[in-house]
Structures are given as C-alpha cells and as structure tokens.
Amino acid sequence: MDSKTLEKMWATFIKATLQVSGSFTVKDIKKEVHKAKSQLYPDRQAVRLEIKGKILKDSDDIKSLGLKNGDMVFIKDLGPQIGWSTVFMAEYAGPLFVYLIFYYRPWIFYGSEAASKPYSYVAHLAALCYIVHYTKRVLETLFVHRFSHATEKISTNFKLTTLSSQFCQLGNLSIHLALRDLRPPGTNVRRIPVATSNPFTSLFDYVSCPNYTYEFGSWLSFSLLTSCFPALLFASAGMYQMTVWALGKHKNYKKEFPDYPKQRKAIVPFVI
C-alpha cells in the first residue's frame, strides 16, 4: 500500500467487545468508529471490505457480509461534509437573491441613469420566470426532495416563450414529485422510475433523467425570451453538465436493474 493510500484510509477491527450479532449493521460500525475517533462522524465515513472494494451501504448487516468478530474492514475518511439541503438552498437561494438585486436596484450596477429608465415588458416577464423557477427550487428542497445521502463533500460544492418555460417548470416539478414517491420516507429504497398518471411524467418512457431535460428546456426558453446570449451560454453549460450526470445515472440504472427499459436514453429522447 503506498503512502497516499495510507494517508486516506485506515483499518479498524470489529472487536469482540462490540458484541456483534446478525443484526449489527454497517451504520453501527460507523457509530463505533465515531466513538473511537470523534472527528469521523458517520456521514464522513466510507466502509469497505477491501481497500479498493465497493462502498458498503449503511443498511448492510454483518451476517449478510459474512463478517465476524476480529475481521477487518477499511474506513475511508471522506473529508468534512455538508448537508445536501444546505447545498441546494445555497445553490438556489443565492442566484434568486442576486437577480432580485439587479432587478430592483439596477442603478447599483449600471449607474444612476438606470434608475430613471423604464423596464420593457420582456424584462418584467423574464424576472417573473426567473423568480418562479428559483422559488420553486427552494420549495422543492424544503418539502419535496428526499436524498439517498445526507451529505456531500464540502470541497466539491461551489445552472421559445413564457408558456414553454412554465411548461418545463411544471414538468420538472412533476418529475421531482414522482422521484420522491419512489422512495418511502426515511429509507434508501431504489426503484425503476416510471411514468405516473401525471402526463408530464410520460417523458420517463424516453429518458432516464427527464428532470434534466425539462431543466434545459426551461433555460433555453428563457434565453429565447430575453434574447440574452449569456443566458444561452449558461443554458449550454448547464446542458453539458446535466448530460454528464444523466449518462452516469443512466449507466447506474442499467447496471442496478437487469430489466431496465432498453429503449430509454439518458437525457435527450432517441439521441443521448
């Protein structure tokens, strides 16, 4: 094992004093490690049976893993963590707040003459679309999203017409609600996402991540509405990043579920 690996990983034994039973889980191991090394709280740990092995789920029990007192498991320090809810609140509330400053106090950025110039109808319409978009995202973070992981690493955390834009917003919300209903509260259950009675979710028949498809459609519509080239650049950059995420999720779906629908693409129907 090289020095770099030694810096990131350390081994611990399941001691006989833990009184391990068949119901003892990986989550219980993390709690015991936390008692021994206080800075390694459970969400900061990744538990493996081998140094480069698969990360074990918190719900995995000792009996199913074939472990017994005295066996070795490997704990990786994932580094300081931040709650996903905090991540999303910062990601959505921040842009909303900054935009409102530009909208209500334009003279701060464009000079005193900006205060006397009237807004165009499109500017008001664009502001409405923008506010609705990010307000929806904030409310989803508070009341809709259920995260399979409570935290993420802090260092990795630093996105036509008005009718079309709002259509995409409704579609995006519908997908998030459908995904939420797939996972019962307080669990990490994973199922194949499928269309529901809500017609906006029918995009699940064609792509694995329709929420990203709707998201790009929303920003593309906003760019066309405002004729704003920076907004189009933002939409394009967002589409690239969401495509990367969608391809990764699509690959994981196919690997996890042998009966995953073969006709589905990742983000663009029939294409990607």
Image: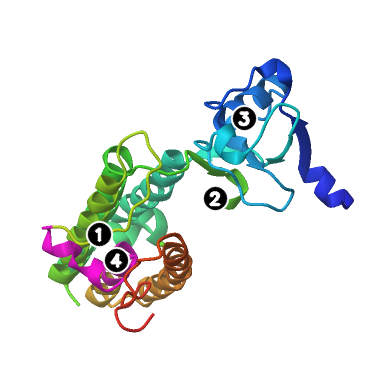
Residue 258: which quarter of the image? bottom left
In reply to whether residue 220 is colored magenta, the answer given is: no
Per the image, label 3 sits on a secondary structure element best described as helix
Q: Earlier in the sequence, mark 3 or mark 1?
A: 3
Single out the mark in the foreground, 1 or 4. 4
Name which residue type carries label 3.
Answer: Lys
Name which residue type carries label 2.
Answer: Asn
Per the image, label 2 sits on a secondary structure element best described as loop
Q: Is residue 119 visible?
A: no
What numbered label is drawn on residue 210?
A: 4
What numbered label is drawn on residue 8?
A: none
Q: Quadrant of the C terminus?
A: bottom left
Residue 2 percent coordinates (x, y): 88, 53
* Cα distance between the residues tagged 1 and 4: 7 Å
Q: Earlier in the sequence, mark 1 or mark 4?
A: 1
Residue 144 percent coordinates (x, y): 27, 43
Give the residue at mark 1: 172
In the rendered image, the vertical position of residue 215 relative to residue 136, given as above or below: below
Q: Earlier in the sequence, mark 1 or mark 2?
A: 2
Q: Earlier in the sequence, mark 3 or mark 2?
A: 3
Q: Earlier in the sequence, mark 2 or mark 4?
A: 2
Pointers 4 and 3 in contact (CB under 8 A)? no
The residues colored magenta run 197-217
Residue 164 percent coordinates (x, y): 17, 71
